[in-house]
Amino acid sequence: MLQILFKNRLLFLSSSNVVLTALYMALILKQGGFDEMSDGYFSAHAVLVYIFAIVGAITTRPLMPYLTGMKKHDVPAISVGVLIYASSVACILLVSILLFSESITRFILWGAGESRLNLTRELLDIMAWSAAPFALCSTFQAYGQYQGKFVKVELICIGSHIVSILTLLTVAAPIHAIGWSFLARYFVRAFLMAEMFPWKKIHLIECKQVWRLTKSFIVKTVVLIGSSSFYKLMGVLDVFVTSFLSEGSLSLIKTIQFIYSGLTTIFNRSYFTPFVRRLALEHNKLQRSFSASLAEKLPHIAILAGVSGISVSIGLSLLIKFEIIPSGNITQAQIITYSMVLAVSLIGDVWGNASTSLFYARGDMNTPTKVGIIGMIIAICHKYSLALWLGGGGIVVSAALHYLGNAVVLHSQLGKIRDDNTKI
């Protein structure tokens, strides 16, 4: 009974986070609709997502599963080492963005006009400062989740979203409101999550121990960082391709993807992260492989995707019909088509993330990396080809093929290594 209550509470908190994220995006879209200002925000955000993916390749994705496979007395030492490592990488990326923001925006927005270029660059110059607090809060979050503090993590995320929304509503100038509200979210999150970190144990940690453990972790994540920096070019490529399309195309695609990303976060945090943690900690007791255990969850993912596609189609259509969000150049047919096709990518995203985490729980960071690189190369080819043929529709079809294809391959590879799993 307690376990059911815990899961329901976690599901409620994760859902609240997604609702707040959706409210934040709705406030941005209410100002600009599916048009130039929103396109500028999503263009700048794509660069931030790219930075977060690189830092997340050190913290958010591998660290929690990695900690479950370590001896307890080594966990604080590796956590401190990763904190320093992730913060250093984030600061390097921040300086690079600030020095070359104009060149970056002109390159990724090759086909855009000066107005959208200026909007994107102004936003990027503010939002880029979130790289450092993201490195901190993602490390704190991984350690908190390792300790099983899933509810606390969700509560802190809710608080940071509320602060972000209040900042957005308080600051008068639209560009500064968007930029500073985004930045406030991660500063608040880092400040509040810091309490979960093992600061009291730092005086017991030896520098040699930190270096020895962190060096091994760095070796394992170098390839992961390389693959993430390549793999997450997909979002930047979307910005590049849509810069040649009509205004609003990027905003619609990214709005739907963001909604689905929020739903993915709900499912991962409330269901799959605890699921992966349990499998990793109890692998000696398992009578079947990680692959078989994950396969049982796939019907739940398919149902989630179907319901999500229908709900998003109806929701966005109503918001535009009642003029809550300006439609710009977007049609009803585009909303329905993009929502349903991208629901397929939602299946692949959740499924692929769970498979990847199970590889990390085994200490294998190479297999997901190889699959990601090969999948990205293939995706670049069909994304460009389909975009030329179908415009914005080609971009969403490409995304669906990419995520679903990667998930299928990862799961099949996970099944091949079954099997010493029960003998570990």
Image (cartoon, rainbow, N blue to C red):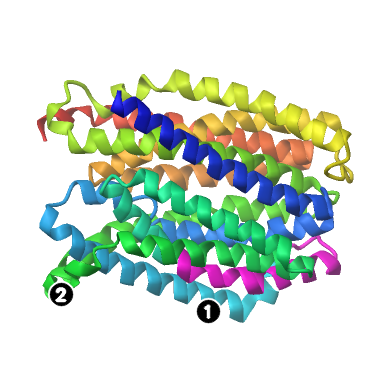
Which residue does the numbered mark 2 point to in the structure image?
203
Prevailing secondary structure class for the magenta stretch in the rendered image? helix
Q: In the image, what residue type sits under mark 1?
A: Val
Callout 2 environment at 10 Å: few (<14), some (14 to 19), or many (20+)? few
Residue labelled with disc 1: 95
Q: Quadrant of the N terminus?
A: top left
Q: Is residue 112 magenta?
A: yes
Residue 92, relative to residue 276: is it above or below?
A: below
Q: Using the image, tell me which numbered label, if any, was put on residue 256.
A: none
Secondary structure of residue under mark 1: helix
Q: Position of residue 290 (x, y in %)?
A: 27, 29
Magenta segment includes 423: no
Q: Quadrant of the C terminus?
A: top left
* Horizontal side of residue 137 vs 81, given as left or right: right
**Number of marks in the rendered image:** 2
Q: Nearer the viewer, residue 177 or 152?
A: 152
The magenta stretch is: 108-135
User: Horizontal and vertical percent for residue 63?
Assistant: 31, 53
Can you give x and y, in whole percent of width and height, for residue 168 in the image?
A: 69, 61
Q: Nearer the viewer, residue 363 or 254?
A: 254
